[in-house]
Image (cartoon, rainbow, N blue to C red):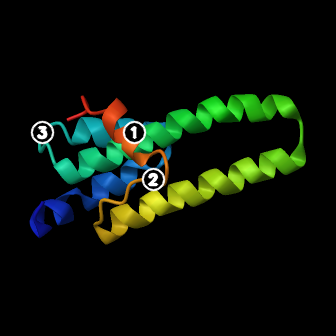
Amino acid sequence: MNKNTIEEGKTMALVAYLTLIGTLIAFFMNQDKKNPFTFFHIRQALGLGLLYIAIGYVVSSLDSMMVSMSFWIFFSILFLYGIFGAITGKLNKIPILGEFFQKTFKSIE
């Protein structure tokens, strides 16, 4: 991937991490340009967003402040890691789950 492709895709890659609505916006706006850098971050953000909802549903039923705070801190760090990768122009996969997200959502291109 060349530097020009990365520079063109940075904005939409960043938008992808701003909630699931941001992911949808980035996906549909990237359909014309087909920027691979943006698609990489869309797949990462979509995986994180869906995992956040699934685990959040379970955590919300536990009614424990310690578990809730751990959940928030964990996902905040993962989202910040993805956002930092998008801003710096790197293809940083989310630790542990990044490869799984890339394989699961490989049809997003």
Residue at 24% from the left image edge and 28% from the top image edge: 107
Quadrant assignment for the N terminus: bottom left
Decide: few, some or many residues near mark 1? Use Cα within 10 Å; few <14, some 14-19, many ≥20.
Answer: many
Identify which residue, 84 or 12, lies in the foreground. 84
- Does the CB distance between marks 1 and 3 fall below 8 Å? no
User: In the rendered image, which quarter is residue 28 located in?
Assistant: top left
Q: Is mark 3 on a helix, strand or loop?
A: loop
Q: Name the residue under label 1.
A: 101
Residue 86, position in %: x, y? 35, 61
User: In the rendered image, which quarter is residue 73 located in?
Assistant: bottom right
Q: In this view, does 54 lie to the left or right of 20?
A: right
Quadrant assignment for the C terminus: top left
The residues tagged by marks 1 and 3 sit, at their Cα atoms, a distance apart of 23 Å
Amino acid type at mark 3: Asp
Q: In this view, does 77 lie to the left or right of 101?
A: right
- Does the CB distance between marks 2 and 1 fall below 8 Å? yes
Q: Residue 32 carries which label?
A: 3
Q: What element carries label 2?
A: loop
